[in-house]
Image (cartoon, rainbow, N blue to C red):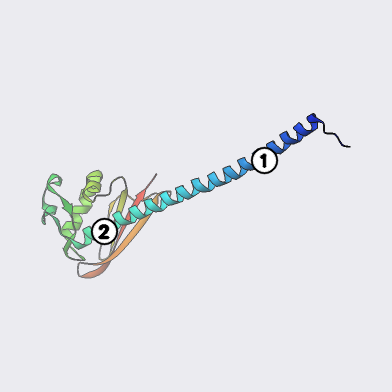
Amino acid sequence: MKTFDLNESGQTILVDLTFALLIFLLVFNSINAAYISSVASVKERSRLNEMQLKATQAIESLVSFEGTPSNWEELPLQQVQEIGLADESKTINEAKLNAFKNLSADYNSTKVLLNLGLFDYFFSLKGADDVNAGLPATTNATQVQVKRIVTYKGEEAIVEFTLYSLS
């Protein structure tokens, strides 16, 4: 008849328990890492969607409306409520464009007027004249770019609006 030694039996249980705990910790860490990665991915997609929405709203406001008040380019910055560059939808007014370019010297105020929040911007019109406003994005910035075809000085031009974040 076989007899069991309690010391051998206890050691076997301890080895089994240690092995089971090790497997549990490995599975738990794998699931936790997958969850953290998934949450980070969702946050990044959400941020990009927010940036895309803000960039689209900003460019549409710029190229489709004349601004508020309609003669904002002649007024001091404190009286400007909304920046718009158009005489009519998608037709850019040269005086408003030059005023916008000059306003970018007060970069933070233009960000507020464009309702960009914490994001930065760069505006570029490529056509009869090339006109830029804002600050160009650095290479390590998260960015979205929206383009529109407009009329400027009677010719077709492309407006590019880049919204970016360094964090």
Going 20% across and 70% down the picture, which residue do you hit?
154
Residue 136 to residue 146: above or below: above
Label 2: which residue?
59
Label 1: which residue?
20
Q: Quadrant of residue 118?
A: top left
* Amino acid carrying mark 2 in the image: Ile
Going 20% across and 57% down the picture, which residue do you hit?
97
Q: Give neighbour class at mark 1: few <14, some 14-19, many 20+ (Cα, 10 Å).
A: few
* Amino acid carrying mark 1 in the image: Ala
Q: Residue furthest top?
A: 7
Mark in the foreground, 2 or 1: 1
As rendered, which of 153 and 141 lies closer to the eye? Answer: 141
Provide residue 90's location: percent of width, then percent of height. 21, 66
Q: Give neighbour class at mark 2: few <14, some 14-19, many 20+ (Cα, 10 Å).
A: many
Tell me if residue 93 can be seen.
Answer: no
As rendered, which of 21 and 50 lies closer to the eye? Answer: 21
Viewport quadrant of the N terminus: top right
SS under mark 2: helix
